[in-house]
Amino acid sequence: MTITLTASTRHIAGSIALAGSKSISNRALIIRALCNETFPIHRLADARDTQLLDALLHSADDIRDAGHAGTTFRFLTAYLAFQPGVQTLTGSERMRQRPIGLLVDALRQLGAQIDYLGKEGYPPLRIGEPRHANAPSRLSITADTSSQFISALLMIAPTLPQGLELTLEGNLVSRPYILMTLRLMEYFGVQHTWEDRVIRVAPQSYSPRPFTVEADWSAASYYYAIAALSDSCDLHLEGLFANSLQGDAVLQKIMLEFGVATLFTETGVRLQKTDTPLPHIFDWDFLECPDIAQTLAVVCGALGVLGFFTGLETLHIKETDRIAALQTELDKIGVILAKCPPGHGLISGRQYYLVDGSLFNMPATPLFHTYEDHRMAMSFAPLALLAPIRVADPGVVEKSYPGFWSDLERIGLEGEKG
């Protein structure tokens, strides 16, 4: 199935009630499961991954299938490792290609009994009864693969008999997601210290209290892209907080370079198009906000802005290899995404990628494939402001934003599935 997306206007106005953040929702669900009593979570994300995590946390089945949901799988691995009983945790074919060994090794050191049922270091997993006796409370973990491994360990840390002292080794990726986890833990009464490379969490209890989930800044990025490609824009996005937990809130700063101003209101943000000239070169380190890199690659390409992107290390191990997927799909519109030779870029020793849209050209209704990746579908959707496009497998957005296509229609981007 595909969806053909056509813009009835390039003058964008209206209001969108964004869904709750998947990242925040998933952490809140794990913390609630670790509490001694339940509490209400308001505006929980309607993302498929979040609904699946909620269901699996309440499941009594011996086999639990996380499908494509990477965060769900990683958080559940740590959670189930110290629960009674024996469970099998599995996932989709793509999930069985995504490494889990670093997290499993760390959990085993803490007393978890986890076996691989297939390839060593990859799902599926058999998770047995934990052994707490004489388990160490100190761990070191490589911090340059996935912050979700670190967050998974931190959330169970206060429930361990001796707590946890976690040393982060190597280049720390996605630091804001770790800070998000720690700030949520603080909201629910769990204290920590973070000195240099060491995070310490003493044994303590979570305190249940009502919680409201902020809207998703990653989802907001697609509307920022629409604003950047529009002729004019006055668009309100409901549910975003000025004091955000999310690293992707840096969009406010980034999109100023592309002529999109952010004004906070009582209920969210208002996006307005400005007369700011486009930059000749856009240079950004996405290490702390990798989920918006696809969006910015499309924006740079479509506007003919030369982009230098770094901090993309984790994009290879997402729902798909996002670097390869971007290269293939951007090529369809004459945009080049290429790895720069060593030594290119402002930050010494870092790998940079070049986005070159100087030959940008929209063919008649191009078809963009999505590779079972929700962000591929949503990142390319704003191109419909320039010409009609087709997007394959539109249902893939259910992973994080089920109402995406209907919300686009509210602001003049009409979709026809076929």
Image (cartoon, rainbow, N blue to C red):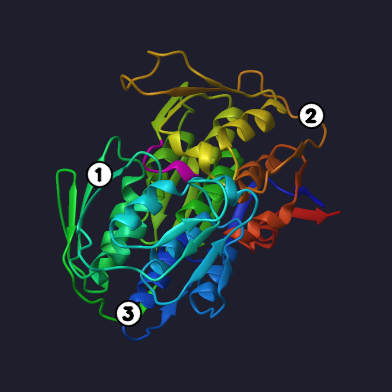
Residue shown at 57%/69% (left/top)?
64
The kind of residue tagged 3 is Cys
Q: CA distance from mark 3 to mark 1?
A: 26 Å
Q: CA distance from mark 2 to mark 3?
A: 54 Å
Q: What type of secondary structure mainly makes up the magenta span?
A: loop
Residue placed furthest toward the bottom? 37
Instruction: Name the residue carrying label 1.
Output: 168
| Above or below: residue 367 compared with residue 89 | above
| Local secondary structure at mark 2 | loop
Q: Residues within 10 Å of mark 3 (few under 14, many from 20)?
A: some
Residue 88 seen in render: yes
The kind of residue tagged 1 is Leu
Residue shown at 55%/33% (left/top)?
297
Instruction: Name the residue carrying label 2.
Output: 363
In which quadrant of the rendered view does residue 161 lie?
Answer: bottom left
| Above or below: residue 95 compared with residue 185 | above
Question: Magenta span covers which residues?
Answer: 286-291
Front residue of 320/289: it is: 320
The kind of residue tagged 2 is Pro
Residue shown at 61%/31% (left/top)?
324
| Local secondary structure at mark 1 | strand
Residue placed furthest toward the right? 418
Q: Which mark is residue 35?
A: 3
Label whose residue precedes the other's in the sequence (2 or 3): 3
Residue shown at 26%/76% (left/top)?
206
Label 1 vs label 2, nearer the camera: 1
